[in-house]
Amino acid sequence: MNKVFTLLVFAGVPVSVIGSLLHWPSVIMFVVYCVTIIALAAFMGRATESLAVVSGPRIGGLLNATFGNAVELIISIFALKAGLIGVVLASLTGSVLGNLLLVAGLSFFVGGVKFKRQKFNVFDARHNSGLLMFAIIVAFVIPEVFSMEMNEGKTMNLSIGISVILILLYLFALFFKLVTHRGVYQSEGGETHDHDEEPEWSKGKALLILALSTLAVAYVSERLVHTFEEVGEAFGWSELFIGVIIVAIVGNAAEHASAVIMAYKNKMDVAVEIAVGSTLQVAMFVAPVLVLISLFFEKSMSLVFTLPELVAMVSAVLLTVIISNDGETNWFEGLTLLAAYFIMGIGFYLL
């Protein structure tokens, strides 16, 4: 599989450049761009997995979530520049749903088929549950409720204030987990790690591949954004569906692959950190950063989602919290999360 992704990267990037210069049909280029980004994301996943072996599950999961979200952040910035506010908000929704339901669901299912019970750190699960409830239910619902009684200018100011608070709290959350309370709750649960495991790539090589892959993703993402309108018309996809399903899956391909691989290896601390940690990073860092970046473009983006998006995200959070709060999982719980994702996917497609 690694050879396939390597071939796709070395073929996909040149084809993306050539096709863009020769103005090939948008539908064909859309497929080329998506496949290339997924292949690049696989490279990023392998690099971050190597760093996870060296750094430990928490930092490894954080690195995986960060570079996985870097892909989506890049796509979203170019979408903001193009004025596609709806696509950006929908992609944020799709990331939350994709990570909590699709990525976690696949991880729990695949790992659960191989191991009847899989455990992960109970404290981390409960700590993340509180942050999920805050980030999604408080920080995302509040702008929607207050915007009903506010004009556009006040709604934007509210979004800016909430964005600053979210970023600060996210930084404090990292400080809490990685500095002041690092290792304090290590005995609360979780798998035993093999400290003799060798990383696939050295630290320097992994960092170099991450940097080069990110640059390549930036170029391909900018091209991808320009195909959305014609592809939507060709397939009858709404802007909402493109953002929630297509952009979210392509943009989060690195986490999707890495989390499932980690679960299959019974490294559930890393798998859960990727799925839930990535969601927290999207809600508490990526989304507010995009709000602040949008101030420099012609159209500013407020943190006001549509009602279906909000209901879907809140439902995903509540279901994930209920399933993961005991610190262990099985294949049926994974299947339950996947079922919820597909139900929501059908809804967004038909909306």
Image: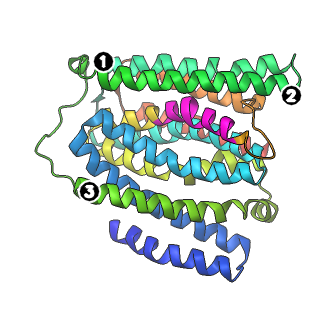
Location of residue 87 in the rendering, given as x and y in whole percent from the top left corner: 73, 47
Location of residue 82 in the rendering, given as x and y in whole percent from the top left corner: 76, 54
**Residue lying at 34% horizontally and 71% vertically, measured from the top left:** 3
Q: Which residue is mark 3?
A: 204
Q: Categorize mark 2 by other alpha carbons within 10 Å: few (<14), some (14-19), many (20+).
A: few
Q: Secondary structure at mark 3?
A: helix
Q: Quadrant of the C terminus?
A: top right
Q: Which residue is mark 2?
A: 152
State whether residue 108 appears in this view. no
Q: Categorize mark 1 by other alpha carbons within 10 Å: few (<14), some (14-19), many (20+).
A: few
**From the viewer's perspective, is 151 left or right of 321?**
right
Q: Which residue is mark 1?
A: 180
Tag 2–tag 3 contact (CB < 8 Å): no
- Mark 1 belongs to which amino acid? Thr
Instruction: Say if 23 sits above or below 314 in the image.
Output: below
> Tell me, what colour scheme is on the image?
rainbow
Q: Categorize mark 3 by other alpha carbons within 10 Å: few (<14), some (14-19), many (20+).
A: few
**Residue lying at 62% horizontally and 68% vertically, measured from the top left:** 31
Q: Earlier in the sequence, mark 2 or mark 1?
A: 2
Q: Earlier in the sequence, mark 1 or mark 3?
A: 1
Location of residue 200 in the rendering, given as x and y in whole percent from the top left corner: 23, 57
Q: Nearer the viewer, residue 117 or 278?
A: 278
Instruction: Say if 91 sits above or below 82 in the image.
Output: above
Q: Where are the magenta residues, as a range?
A: 278-293
Instruction: Say if 24 sits above or below 285 in the image.
Output: below
Tag 1–tag 3 contact (CB < 8 Å): no
State whether residue 54 appears in this view. yes
- Mark 2 belongs to which amino acid? Glu
* Cα–Cα span, label 2 and label 1: 40 Å
- Mark 3 belongs to which amino acid? Gly
Residue 290 part of the magenta segment: yes
